[in-house]
Amino acid sequence: MTPAKKPKLAVWKFSSCDGCQLSLLDCEDELLALAGEVEIAYFLEASRATVKGPYDLSLVEGSVTTADDVERIRRVRQMSRKLVTIGACATAGGIQALKNFADVGDFISIVYATPEYVSTLATSTPISAHVPVDFELHGCPIDKRQLLEVMTSFLHGRRPQISSTSVCTECKRRGTVCVMVAHGTPCLGPVTHAGCGALCPAYDRGCYGCFGPMETPNTPSLTRQLHVLGMGDRGVERVFRTFNVEAFEEARRDG
């Protein structure tokens, strides 16, 4: 009797820091069990050995910042039965999307000694701006437990069970006192997608919005509260313009 073929898993990198791919490698004990259930066919962060597609599940890290990226993500989509984007870069353009609100030519001339050799688009955009995406997993970096849930769900043909609430709910669960109420610390927790376990507030730091906007974020209300704390318009803008700058700017426009 011929043994059943394992589903093929591929992991792709675009413009990013590799942190979300490392979250998969950081699964340690679970990684061996995962390797027993799937064929890791393409994952250059882990191995140079590759297997040709098509692939049952592709995980994509990184944003689209070059013309080559645009063509490559289209090829990846064609080879993938299911495509999941992982991390702030892939789901929102990442911190590099700051260039979307400035002159990219100025950035290049300041950062690079020989800017004439740099080929880049004027914007950094999420993968969903170019191809259909089956699921977006937020985070900078992503949470490995959420990643395992997403991979397991797609391999078994069900919807991932990922919370769509805010970081505030995680603060409540772990008994963390609200840093905005208690200390007047600016915090994006009320509008940020849960998933980090409220790590920063647990250490008396305001949430930086690493997991991007939650479902239906009330950004106007938070903006008013930040003004009450004494922040000016420029300060509020800087708070929102971090790891998920493009996504938060869109949420603020819609709000």
Image (cartoon, helix red, strand yellow):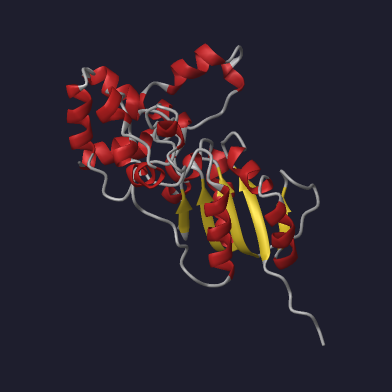
Q: 156 or 248, which lies in front?
A: 156
Q: Which percent across, then down, holds residue 163? A: 40, 55
Q: Which percent across, then down, holds residue 219? A: 23, 37
Res 131 visible: no
Q: Which percent across, then down, holds residue 165? A: 34, 51
Is 135 placed above or below 111 here?
A: below
Q: Quadrant of the C terminus?
A: top left
Res 24 visible: yes
Q: 183 or 14, which lies in front?
A: 183
Query: In the image, is 33 to the left or to the right of 209?
Result: right
Residue under the image location 42 percent in, 39 percent down: 198
Residue under the image location 26 percent in, 18 percent down: 234
Query: In the image, is 186 to the left or to the right of 61?
Result: left
Residue under the image location 28 percent in, 19 percent down: 235
Q: Residue furthest bottom?
A: 1
Q: Which percent across, then down, holds residue 168? A: 33, 42
